[in-house]
Amino acid sequence: MKEIILPDMGENITEATVSFWHHQTGEEVKAESELVEFYTDKANFSVKSPVDGVLRTILVKEGEKATVGKVIGIIEEK
């Protein structure tokens, strides 16, 4: 299992809000494909899948906030 973590975006950003998941639980994902979109008051950005696999768990849903370093989802690697 591979944890997906909200990365440090710099610029003193400590949290971000999920705007859109590109995949839902149970769907296959490819490494480097867009996985989830976030927004802050300073920037919009996306997190890509680090591995090929299946998205098993979404821990931070659309509209919810996450802090930098928090696990936001889990991918079961293929």
Image (cartoon, helix red, strand yellow):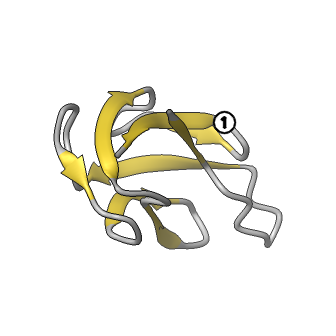
**Relative image position of residue 74 (x, y in whole percent):** 45, 34
**Relative image position of residue 47 (x, y in whole percent):** 47, 62
62 or 7: nearer the viewer: 7
* 27 left or right, relative to 55: left
Q: Residue visible at 44% across and 26% down?
A: 59
**Relative image position of residue 53 (x, y in whole percent):** 32, 47
**Relative image position of residue 9 (x, y in whole percent):** 70, 67
76 or 35: nearer the viewer: 76
* 57 left or right, relative to 26: right
Q: Quadrant of residue 22?
A: bottom left
Farthest residue, direction front: 78
Farthest residue, direction right: 12
Task: Establish if 42 lies above or below 76.
Answer: below
Q: Residue visible at 55% across and 60% down?
A: 40
Q: Residue visible at 42% across and 59% down?
A: 49
Q: Residue visible at 22% across and 32% down?
A: 25
Q: Which residue position is annotated with label 1? A: 70
* 69 left or right, relative to 75: right
68 or 71: nearer the viewer: 71
**Crowd band around label 1 with a 10 angstrom C-alpha radius: few (<14), some (14–19), many (20+):** some
Q: Amino acid at mark 1?
A: Lys
Q: Quadrant of residue 3?
A: top right
User: Which SS class for mark 1?
Assistant: loop
